[in-house]
Image (cartoon, coloured by chain):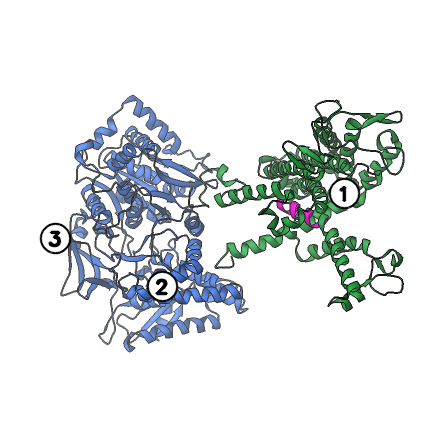
Amino acid sequence: MRGRPKLYTSYIAEAQLFPTRVQKILVVVGIIVLVLMPFDLPVINQIPIVRFLGDNIWLRLVNRMLIFTIAALGLNILSGLAGQVSLGHAFFMGSGAYTAVLVGGKGSANLWGWGLPIWIWLPASGVVAALVGIAVAPAAVRVRGLYLGIATLGLVFIGLHLSRVFPEIAGPGALGRKWPRMQFRLWKEEDPLVDFSRDGDWLWFEASKNQKTYLLLLALTVIAAVVAANIARTRTGRAFSAIRERDVAAEIMGVPEFRYKTMAFAISSFYAGVAGALLAVLAGQVPPESWGLLLSIQFIAILLIGGIGRVSGALLGTFFVVLSPRFIEEVIDWMKEQVDHGGILAGVFDILISTGDGDGGILAISETALGYPLPASALDELVYGLLIVVFLLFEPMGLYGIWVKVRNYWKGWPFSY
Amino acid sequence: MSLTVADSPTAETGGGVATVASRARDWADRAPRQVALREKDFGIWQEFTWERTWDLIMDAANGLLALGVEPGERVSIQSEDRPEWVILDLATVAIRGITVGLYPTNPAAEVEYLLTDSNATVHFAEDQEQVDRALEVDAARLPGLRRILYTEPRGLNSYDDPRLMYWGDFLEMGRRHREDSPGEVERRMAEALPEDVMTLVYTSGTTGPPKGAMLTNANVDYAMTVITGDTGLRGAQIPGPGDLTLTYLPLCHVAERIFSTWHLVGCGVCLNFAESIDTVVSNLREVQPTLFFAVPRIWEKMHASVMIRGGDVTPFKRVWLGLGLRMATVIGREKVSNGGKHTPMSWLLNLIGYPLVFRALKERIGLRRCWHAGSGAAPIAPEVLEFFIGIGVPVYELYGMTENSAVATVNYPGRMKLGTVGEPYPDIGFRIDEETGEIQTKHPAVFAGYWNKPEQTAETFTDDGWLKTGDVGEWVDGTHVRIVDRIKHIIITSGGKNISPSEIENSLKTSPYVKEAMVIGDGRKFLAALIGIELDTVGDWALRRNIPYTTYRDLSEKPEVLELVQGIVNETNEKFARVESIRKFKMIPKELDHEDGELTATQKIKRSAMEDMFGDLVESMYS
């Protein structure tokens, strides 16, 4: 009821994603800002983070982040909502990626590929991954918790093995094969309708390939996020939560465990498949090894740091995990610059970094000092590890949990509860 | 829409006199889409428009006709507040029956008394618990009882008493009756007479068994005109269909009946039924009513919860809230000394305090949109009143009793006086007997007498026909009335001094730690008191001091708690004269309860029962 936000007269009102008018306006404004972000427009490029992410060098990273978001949203449905631990997310992403290259890639004598357009290979990669997910799901009904984690870990190695057995799909060498370009064609005609992989005219304005790709990925991510948020507040989402809390109890309450676990795997794998296809297409060429354990763990890190079980947690986590290595690099570069030019803190930074052969320091940043105590390139892995430990110990709800605490502080005003 | 009692139609539009039922029908005609009732069900506030409400009332009225309820026959209701209560009440009035309300807490023995005394023909028992109480009464003692209606079928499947009937089936029967013989309810309504008794309101009975006060259509009509009219309890401001209220006190009590049912039919105020008395706090936050009425106990609890939660905050909030509460104290004092209106000083402080603390604070307690609140049925501690006025919730104390349909005195907005119950309504007969100090009233809302109790009725009236309220009052500044005590409660010590125990008891109860207090000393050398602690607050207090305890009794006998209570008693003693000070006190070893007979249904102490029960404790203080 108007003016009384807590007086719900229907379930529809109660389950609204953005119940108040202020929230609705903020969402619209936020989306407008995101859409205009890469285009160096007068007002928008003054917003702090936007100014800096809208930069073309960063935009490629932002695109990668959007793809990771889609995949993280998928894992969030499986692990966060339905509570099924999975280390096999990379495998499902790989399934999607190879489906994309099989359906959309160019075939040759020793490579399979049908060369079909994006509107076929993108959904196909999701569907095939979902089917793989459905095939795996029965395992989740038999084993729980850590054991399910181990079982899904096996998938990753099965995937790596398969990539060797079928060089016709994965490509002959360790570098892998070329994925189709990000282009929109109606069928197999020569000129693509929209070419996301080249700079140039688009509709009536000039846009770089990164800007165009950004808009496409943004649209896909928004759709993925809205669908994920909607799943959470439907009957299916509530069934997932019931299973997460206790699958046996859920079954007794009339939530079919098998059906919903299968569904969770299918939906999650669909997201993973689409994200995997996009990731491979964006990279152009991906070695089979990259769909390995490390990728799976990255997604676990995303969920744990962002806050498991929440769409906004997945968003925050991806933002953090994908962009933080670049931030760290920037910081180290800056420290090096300070040392080289003798800034105020040069003395301190000199102790921290080693720039060359004779120089001592914890972080090695130049080729000649490689691996001295610790190469700077390994730093982000170290930081992840540390962050996971810190978050699990002190803020199990992740970045989202911090937000919840801040929000509750004001929500309870002037009390504490 | 600004439809009010004044222009609501009477005989001309529908025939018969205006009853609560005919007014409900008029609302259904004028504003069929307006929401009349809201009830929280499965987490959602289900809305009843006037059209639907009236439809249900008609079904229920026809159902009663189908059960053969004749004019003047009683329909009793024992239920928590819910739409069925109001619907059945109005349906009963529509067919010229008499509604009898029972407290949902009435134990089986009292249910038996009330059902036999009123000789009800149809009894509405909400759920299995209430049905059990009704069935416990020997059927032979209730020859007139034809049907027991219930609305919560859970647990009742295996019951085979032929009198039981499900509410839904009852309405269905009514619907069929309505189709078969339409117009019968309308005819009954057209025959309604001003002198028809429309309800029996059983008084709580602190002394002796409850008595059923008969209120007629004319009584209620007059009471509604006076209370909600333009010289009513809100001064010139008249509530309307945009107003919301929370219905949570027992509807069988005249206060909630006035503030809910009669405001519903009189002003079109939307009723929101609280899920239960335990959820009032969260329901208040959801509904944010514009009008609110509470008994002092509720106000005191709300005040205590603000204080306790306020003490349990992070340092920054503590400073902030402390500042706000200090401002509220000043504003409260300023406003109270100015009749409830702002002084320049309080206006300024409020300007600062509102955005910083008061707005959020009121939102949290659910009274942000409340523009008029009442407190009545018992005396309220002035500090509590001052606090609420200070944060901007305009709470006014008012006074009335069942026997005069609660038409007596009221604190008008802008003319209030702290510690008084206000001024008599204009143009009503109101006097304070010079000899005894008893308040007496005479106006058209004074009841028609007690049901089947002619002698007691006669005792209630003076020789010249004024209603004796049994309350001792005194004039303050010639305009306002202060209630001293019940006549029967006045203590005369062995020294011959007249003492009003209620004032001392209320002062004790100002403390959030004291729930019950009973001052004793009639015919004794000094005053003593029985004191019962508030388990929540004292438990919390003990927890913070690491005092372990097991039960209520254990807690109230802890030396630390005794010390705490001694402190409260000392504080009270300072406020009163020496002869009025409490020399000794003992803790009540159990939580008082309606079922055990220590409290009335309205949570007032039954003195006689207490003296029987805790006689040893009392004697031990005097030996």
Is residue A126 a member of the stretch shown in magenta?
no
What's the residue type where badge 2 is placed?
A: Leu
> With B5 as the anchor, is A28 left or right in this view?
right
* Contact? badges 3 and 1 (CB < 8 Å): no
Q: Nearer the viewer, residue A107 or B124?
A: A107
Instruction: Answer above or below: position of B408 versus B179.
Output: below
- Helix, strand, or loop for circle 3? loop
Is residue A311 a member of the stretch shown in magenta?
yes
Per the model, the C-alpha gap separating discs 1 and 2 is 62 Å
Which residue is labeled 2 in the image? B348
Chain letter for mark 2, please: B
What residue span does the magenta drawing correspond to?
A: A308-321
Query: Which chain is rendered green in the image?
Result: A
What's the residue type where badge 3 is placed?
A: Gly
* Contact? badges 1 and 2 (CB < 8 Å): no
Query: Which chain is rendered blue in the image?
Result: B
Main structural element of the magenta stretch: helix, strand or loop? helix
- To which quarter of the image does residue B525 belong? bottom left
**Residues beneath discs 2 and 3 located on the same chain:** yes
Q: How many labels does the image show?
A: 3
